[in-house]
Image: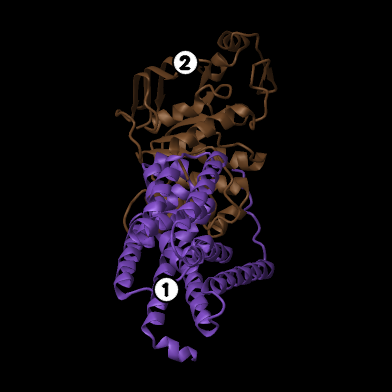
Amino acid sequence: MGLSFYLHQAFAQHALIAAALISVACGLLGPFVVTRGAAFAVHGTAELAFTGAAAGLLISDDPVVGALVGSVVVATAIGLLGARTRERDSAIGVILAFGLGLGVLLLGHYDGFATEATNILFGYIYGVSTRQLLILLIIVAIVIVLTALMFRPLLFASVDPELAEARGVPVRLVGLLFLYLLAVTVTEAAQIVGTLLVLSLTITPAAAAQRLSARPAVVMSLSVIFAMLAADGGLVANLQHPTVKASVFVTFISFGLYVLARIASLLMRHSRVHPEPAEVHHH
Amino acid sequence: MAGDVAVSLRGATLRFGARVLWDGLDLDVRRGELVAVLGPNGAGKTSLIRVLLGLQPLTAGEVLVNGRPPRRGDHAIGYVPQQKGFDRDLPLRGTDLVRLGLDGHRWGPVRPSRDARRRVAAAIAAVGATGYADAPLGGLSGGEQQRLRIAQALLADPSVLLCDEPLLSLDLGHQQAVMTLIDRQRRERESAVLLVTHEINPILPLVDRVLYLVGGRSVVGTPDEVMTSEQLSDLYGAPVDVLRVRNRIVVVGAPDLEHDHLSGGHHHVEDELRTQRGLL
């Protein structure tokens, strides 16, 4: 069964489209995650999505809705936790650890524990129906629209919160909105790579993009492209080598792109003549 | 118009719980005037700026900026926050930073605007930063970053300019460059300037008046009037000597004033502010 055969199958097409859509959302938000130092919050949200998925499975046999609810609840908690990084990260760690244990407990009550756990933790995107694809399309469209609407205030609040606040940007509100967008995106991304490896689509492509440019628009575009290469590339590789999980290929490609970006930026720096700082003129 | 009162405080009191920062502060700052705000860490200097920015309400008293109560996001006020070095990998250029000062607060998709680009370029040129405005911010020196900050603050031609420790950790050359820019805005555009600093000497030739805040008490006047042993001893409630050494003012014995600028007091204020803002 060759690759071209699989590519004609609906399940593979759906999966590839879903992966592309999710990559767009992850790629758009990734640079902000990096700038705001929210990587651990992303991880925490993803793991609590696992707990939500487990609860969703038990309650109504719907892990996705459960994951969504779980991640939104956690995003709210994190958003209200306030600001001091060390304090916040400890709180996230505490919630995360407890949440994971709770998730394992819940999932233990489910018949088929092992399979479901693997799917939630490591991703399984091949069951995406047309209806689910449509919902995903709507969700990603919302993420795109909202990100476009709040791009400037979000950028401002992320790089320069004091001045942004002085200029009338509602910094807390923007932060909270961002966390909600993140929660939704993380839940969707977890379907491909699983909750454990969500960072490979939200952080790594953005981190790679940042190595290559300082222009916000360019960074966001590169971030989306890298995420898509990793997600869809990973799926295609999995179709050709079904014994290895897709998330393995996704994380490897993602990391590979990051390494390439670092090498490229080192080369760029060495080849460019370092500009002299401007001379100070005394009047 | 030069001479008009741009900032006015009447009986201004600011209290955080049991801590009184100022009590019955009266101050008028006119356009074209440069007032230095001095005092030990935690005396409420940064809080004064926050009040004028509309971010902090007074506990009692009245404050007016250009004749109206302070509003958040008022573009008639330029603000240079206390310098924090930008992250080395921050995906932002100087041009982007200055542009944020223009329309970073606006929601909605970014529309390409030649006028905006022109204004940003002009502001950057006015501070002499054109050479490095397209380089990543994180790689620039403190002095270069600060110049871009000033371009950002002066972009809207503000009638009031608030600067929080603008010379912190800058070398002498950059300090002079920054002060030249601030002074030019004050003289040519007649902005009223309130400059918070812990060290008056770099700006002494430009200062019209000093506002000295210590533990809920304050005194306003020219440097000659305020920076005397009698005044400061009275303010601090402890013996303080003020010496003039070749046109420089040296303050000896003021509690908390002899620490370097990275002492705990500054961090406390910053932490308080960060907690209030809930930044993630």
Q: Colour of chain B?
A: brown
Image quadrant assignment for residue B9? top left
Chain letter for the residue marked with disc 2 in the picture: B
Label 2 crowd bin: few (<14), some (14–19), many (20+), radius 10 Å:
few
Please give left or right for residue B8 compared with residue A39 in the image.
Answer: left
1 and 2 marks in contact (CB < 8 Å): no
The local secondary structure at tag 1 comes to helix
Please give left or right for residue B96 compared with residue A255 in the image.
Answer: left
Q: Please give the residue where the numbered disc 1 appears in the rendered image.
A: A20
Chain letter for the residue marked with disc 1 in the picture: A
Residue B18 numbered tag: 2
Q: Is residue A12 above or below residue B48?
A: below
Q: Measuring from the top left, give residue A168's x and y in whole percent.
A: 36, 41
Q: Measuring from the top left, give residue A187's x and y in whole percent.
A: 42, 60
Q: Is residue A52 visible?
A: yes
Q: Residue at 64% of width from left, 21% of height from top?
A: B256
**Mark 2 belongs to which amino acid?**
Ala
Image quadrant assignment for residue B253? top right
Q: Measuring from the top left, give residue B155's x and y in whole percent.
A: 42, 47
Q: Is residue A236 above or below residue A264?
A: below
Residue B46 numbered tag: none
In this rendering, the label closer to the viewer, 1 or 2:
1
In this view, the residue in front, A154 or A283, is: A154
The local secondary structure at tag 2 comes to loop
In this view, the residue in front, B53 or A246, is: A246
Image quadrant assignment for residue B243? top right
Q: Colour of chain A?
A: purple
Say if labels 1 and 2 share a chain.
Answer: no
In this view, the residue in front, A165 or A94, is: A94
